[in-house]
Image (spheres, rainbow, N blue to C red):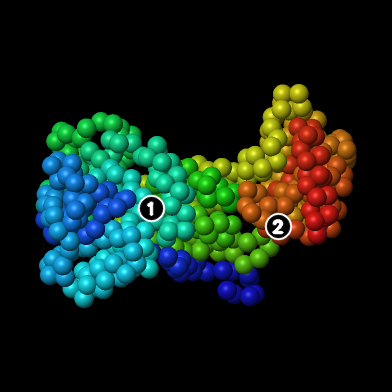
Amino acid sequence: MNSSDNTRRPTEAPSPRMDALARLPVFFALDGKRAVVAGSGPGAAWKVELLSAAGARVDVYAGGAAEEFAEIAAQPPRGPVELHERGWAETDLAGAAIAIGGFAHDEDAARFAQAARGAGVPVNVIDKPQFCDFAFGAIVNRSPLVIGISTDGAAPVFGQAIRAKLEALIPRGFAAWAEAARRWRAGVKTSGLSFGARRRFWHLFTARALRSPHQVPAESDLAGLLALTRTQAAAAEAGSVTLVGAGPGDPELLTLKAVRALQSADVILFDALVDRDVLDFARREAKKMLVGKTGYGPSCKQDDINALMVSLAKSGRRVVRLKGGDPLIFSRAGEEIAACRAAGIAVEVVPGITAAQGAAASLGVSLTHRSHARRLQYITGHDREGKLPADIDWSSVADPSATTIVYMPKKTLGELTSRAIAQGLDPSTPAIAVASATRSTETAVAAPVGEIADRLGEADIKGPVLVLIGRALESAVAVVDETAQQNAATN
């Protein structure tokens, strides 16, 4: 940073480190490999079924309890199941890829686990984690798309609840699309498409699967996707820029289209106001660069951002320009779009939830309540020099039938409200200042518009602020005041 002109240079942000894992999620390749199941009891038959479904050759040593497995052995899901009407022996573990034990007593479990480890075989003893090298989780099966869920034994019921939720969310037709991907992958790889074009193919494939999850993919789909990819090959090689709205803070407010853009990006240029949790939705391999502007603080020059964005796209990168809120509202998107078009770079915009919408949702207030508002307007609290803009339409701000949202008002709010009141705005009009809208640190201050600047200064709240003004806010003012009183009593 140059301290004399308060300029910040674009800087690469380190990729977020992996948080601690209770278990390492892995998927065993068992097709045609030998698996050993010893003992019996609740859960053992289900483990035999799982192993067979994964393609393993399952040897079951159940002694006198072999009849528990007879039905599965007669009709195995996939791999063969052979029953042995005797107990297990250490020699049975030789050459096994995996071993499962079902024992009531710890002594038997310990002996089996020790023998398996001695043979170099990963072992699981059902419901006895102290003897396990790995654990089974809840499964969502859209094979070859398979999702495993583990709570490290802490809350199995919770894991099953999550599985049920995912079962409802993930169409069963995805199994056919995942199988088609497996069939087509080798052909796509030898199709003559470049690396960038092949990536484009799989993005098109994914978009079609998401759009038509219940359609059974046919060879004609492969031909069509390849043809479409070839027509877009030049664009895939040329790179592109996508302006993406990150929303006001809460990462759950991202749109599906925004998530897909983040997951396909090579480089992400993000603003300082973007919540870092939003970056968790990005492709891990993507380079992430902070190009943020801070009100009255260190900021990257817009020309530098434009030049970096264009140069990255020209080198063939898929660039996401990630902006807080909506990219088309007070974020200088117009300059960035113009820079891309002037350079011949393909540019797309993915809208986001703007801070005004997020704040209104948190407050539970309609900004266009039919009894109070006929118009909703957004204005900025400062110009390029950081001063109150000289061209504000004060009669519009003073209109009692309008709801006005003031962005970036911290330094100029007192002057703005004084000018608006002088131009006819009723000083008793409700106003609410909201900082860090939709985030866990969200704070709101309510007061008549004639007092809101002083109240905001007294509160000394941190984070990005916007101020809502208008009669439509009357019901929300009481809620904000009540919350403030509760917080004061708690503190």
- Quadrant location of the C terminus in the rendered image: bottom right
Across and down, in percent, residue 20 comes to: 45, 68
Image quarter of residue 378? top right
Q: Nearer the viewer, residue 344 or 263?
A: 263
What residue lies at 63% left-to-right and 48% top-to-bottom?
Answer: 438
Rate crowding at label 2 as few (under 14), some (14 to 19) or many (20 or more) other CA atoms within 10 Å: some
**Residue 371, position as x, y percentages in the image:** 76, 23
Relative placement, left or right, of 332 versus 219 is: right
Q: Is residue 448 visible?
A: yes
Q: What residue type is labelled 2?
A: Gly
Name the quadrant containing residue 142: top left
Residue pointed to by mark 1: 149
Q: What element carries label 2?
A: loop
Viewer-proximal residue, 168 or 248? Answer: 168
213 vs 88: above or below: above
At 40% across and 56% down in the image, what residue appears?
150
Lateral position of residue 331 relative to residue 149, left or right: right
Image position of 255 with respect to 277: above or below: above
Q: Name the residue under label 2.
A: 386
Relative placement, left or right, of 192 versus 261 is left
Q: How far apart are marks 2 and 1 (CA)?
A: 51 Å
Residue drawn at 63 percent across, 70 percent down: 6
- Amino acid type, label 1: Ile
Q: Which of marks 2 and 1 is nearer the N terminus?
A: 1
Residue 149, given in percent of the width and then of the height, sits at 38, 53
Q: Is residue 463 above or below residue 106?
A: above
Q: Nearer the viewer, residue 339 or 77?
A: 77
Q: In which quadrant of the rendered image does the N terminus lie?
A: bottom right
Residue 105 vs 77, above or below: the answer is below
Q: Who's the residue at 80% across and 34% down the image? A: 474
Secondary element under disc 1, as helix, strand or loop, is strand
